[in-house]
Amino acid sequence: MSEAKPGETRQIQLRIDESKMTQTYANTIRTSTTQDEVVMDFGMNLPMQGPDNNPMLMFNVGSRVVMNWAGAKRLAISLGQVIRQYEERNGEIQLNRPEAGGPRLAQD
């Protein structure tokens, strides 16, 4: 293997192994943090009837992803770019959130 000279860039080939991959669907996410990590629980909000016959949601956690802060920032940037591209082609995604003042993407 030859060494790169100063100022010279080298290409690195990326191989993706999907042989152990699993796929799940999530319609909601819960986040929590520590000083070193971001914890993301992905799952399904399932409507059900509570013990007092009032409607309630059950959050059924399907996957947990733990990332360091640098990885979480790279994820946020990547998702922002993908969402922006989607909205440029298809129009703004409406969240239809019943609660006022919910989370929003930062404006450019």
Image (cartoon, rainbow, N blue to C red):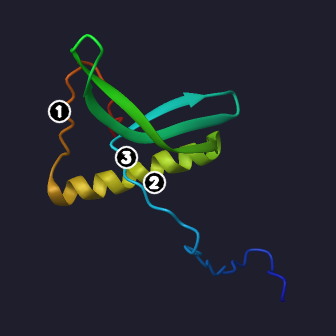
Q: Residue at x 34, y 40 (%)?
A: 108
Q: Along the line of sight, which residue is nearer the eye, 57 or 88?
A: 57
Return the disc, 1 or 3, that comes first in the chain's sequence: 3
Quadrant assignment, res 105: top left
Please tell me how crowded label 3 is: few (under 14), some (14-19), or many (20+) other residues with Cα within 10 Å.
Answer: some
| Callout 1 amino acid | Asn
Please report contact status of discs 1 and 3: CB closer than 8 Å, yes or no: no
Q: Residue at x 30, y 14 (%)?
A: 51
Label 3 secondary element = loop
Q: CA distance from mark 3 to mark 2?
A: 18 Å
| Location of residue 29 in the rendering, given as x and y in whole percent from the top left corner | 42, 37
| Callout 2 amino acid | Ser
Q: CA distance from mark 1 to mark 3?
A: 17 Å
Residue at the bottom extreme of this rendering: 1
| Location of residue 37 in the rendering, given as x and y in whole percent from the top left corner | 66, 36
Quadrant assignment, res 3: bottom right
Label 2 secondary element = helix
| Callout 3 amino acid | Ala
Q: What is the total number of numbered labels drawn onto the structure image? A: 3
Return the disc, 3 or 2, that comes first in the chain's sequence: 3
Return the disc, 2 or 1, that comes first in the chain's sequence: 2
Q: Is residue 37 left or right of residue 22?
A: right
Q: Which residue is mark 2?
A: 78
Numbered circle sitting on residue 19: none
Q: Residue at x 73, y 74 (%)?
A: 7
| Location of residue 101 in the rendering, given as x and y in whole percent from the top left corner | 28, 19
Q: Is residue 55 left or right of residue 10?
A: left
Q: Which residue is mark 3?
A: 26
Q: Which residue is mark 1?
A: 96
Please tell me how crowded label 1 is: few (under 14), some (14-19), or many (20+) other residues with Cα within 10 Å.
Answer: few
Quadrant assignment, res 1: bottom right
Label 1 secondary element = loop
